[in-house]
Image: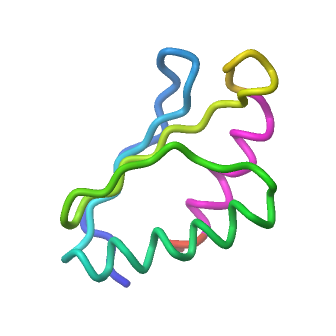
Amino acid sequence: MQKLLEMSWIEKDSKLQKTFTFKDFSEAFAFMTRVAFLAEQHQHHPNWSNVWNTVEIHLTTHDAGNTVTEKDRDLAEAIDQLLN
């Protein structure tokens, strides 16, 4: 899986946000599948969207009042590790 463009996680509007761009839809969807399994392991699930080769992820902790917590930072770091 080749990631074409990577931005840093940005904290904005009480969310950690990041956009990932891949070669094509198949690679983007494969990445989302890997993130889904990872989110289950962390028991923390992203808000996300996918349009063709782009995946946008927003992390926030709903039970902490929709703010960024260590749960979000930990999952963000684990997501980044999927691509290293």
Residue 67, placed above or below residue 76:
above
Residue 83 in view, yes or no: yes
Indicate whether residue 84 is drawn in magenta. no
* Count of numbered labels shown in the rendering: 0
Task: Tell me where residue 30 appears, x and y as whole percent.
Answer: 42, 80
Q: Main secondary structure of the magenta part?
A: helix
Determine the image quadrant of residue 5: bottom left
Kindly identify the residue that appears in the image at 64 percent across and 31 percent down: 60
Residue 77 located within the stretch drawn in magenta: yes
Q: Nearer the viewer, residue 61 or 18?
A: 61
Q: Which residue: 19% across, 65% down?
A: 52
Is the residue 72 above or below the residue 66 in the image?
below
- Residue segment shown in magenta: 69-81
In the rendered image, which quarter is residue 23 located in? bottom left
Q: Residue at x 68, y 25 (%)?
A: 68
Image position of 83 with respect to 69: above or below: below
Is 58 left or right of 50, judged from the image as shown? Answer: right
Residue at image point 27% right, 61% down: 21
Please identify the quarter of the rendering in which residue 51 is found: bottom left
Q: Is residue 1 left or right of residue 35?
A: left
Quadrant showing the N terminus? bottom left
Asked whether residue 6 appears in the rendered view, the answer is no
- The foreground one among 37 and 7 is 37
